[in-house]
Amino acid sequence: MSNTNNPSYSDVSKYYDSEWAKLEKEKLTGINSRHRYILKFLLENGMKSSDSILEIGCGIGTLSSFICSKLKKGHLTGVDISPETIEQNKVRYKHIKNVDFIVSDMTDFSIDKKYDVIILPDVLEHIPIEAHDNIFKTIKRLIKPEGFVFINIPNPYALEYLHVHHKELLQIIDQPIYTNVLLNTAYKYDFYLEHLKTYPVFYEEADYQMMVLRPNVPFKSMTVKPKMQVLFNSLKLRLIDLLN
């Protein structure tokens, strides 16, 4: 189903109820390369096995359960706009003790808890840009000062290509999100961009982007590296330069 003009939250919820059911029927709900990249990047950026994680836009919980397999002492809360999907998740993953699922469109999400990691896995492009301000306002309230926000979205240029050449692949809301637009909102709520990577998954061209945002907290101290470590790293860089 391609884009619809100004769909309501109810329209979006019904759309995903239908889409997830279709994917399950076609047995297309398993872990794929996109999920593996996301988990890889989460671990590389400091996700720990004891972390408390909020996943916004968890869908049918494929990524949720995959991440939970790495949370030996941690816990994940998955949030999604689709009530039917959330109810199915509660049954599907009842054997996983460190996960729970909540229905919310994030406009009224309220919980007395803060998280080490907040994940938005290919969800921001499906939320109208005018609603992003409220999303980041909520995230700001929920993230721990030492935590991080992980965002995965389609490369906006790749999504633009689909809008022109393959509209049949688009979801009910599927908007390209450029980095400057996203960061204007994130900076408003005192986040800073620590890491940005554009990478290929399903195409030869880079079709996805990942970002790591952190709360803007000043360093309390800085630790000088041992001189030998600095020298060793310098020698490694010189060797790489010579080989190239």
Image (spheres, grey):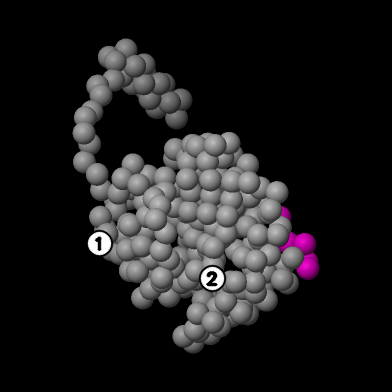
Structural crowding at the residue carrying mark 1, measured as other residues with C-alpha within 10 Å and reported as few (<14), some (14–19) or many (≥20): few
Q: Which circle's residue, 1 or 2, is located before the other in the chain?
A: 2
Amino acid bearing label 2:
Ile
Q: Mark 1 — residue?
A: 188
At 44% from the left edge and 52% from the top edge, which residue is drawn? 118
Give 221 or 160, whichever is nearer the viewer: 221
Spatial CA distance of label 1 from label 2 is: 25 Å
Q: Is residue 241 left or right of residue 25?
A: left
x, y percentage for residue 119?
47, 54
Q: Quadrant of the N terminus?
A: bottom right
93 part of magenta stretch: no
Q: Is residue 5 above or below residue 26?
A: below
Residue farthest to the top, as pictured: 228
Residue 68 got which mark? none
Q: Are marks 1 and 2 in contact (CB under 8 Å)?
A: no
x, y percentage for residue 84?
64, 72
Give 66 or 45, whichever is nearer the viewer: 66
At 63% from the left edge and 46% from the top edge, which residue is drawn? 97
27 part of magenta stretch: yes
Structural crowding at the residue carrying mark 2, measured as other residues with C-alpha within 10 Å and reported as few (<14), some (14–19) or many (≥20): many
Residue farthest to the front, as pictured: 112
As helix, strand or loop, the secondary structure at mark 2 comes to loop
Give 15 or 100, whichever is nearer the viewer: 100
x, y percentage for residue 24?
74, 65
- Which stretch appears magenta? 25-30
Amino acid bearing label 1:
Lys
At 70% from the left edge and 49% from the top edge, which residue is drawn? 95
Q: Mark 2 — residue?
A: 81
**Magenta portion: prevailing SS class:** loop
Q: Quadrant of residue 168?
A: bottom right
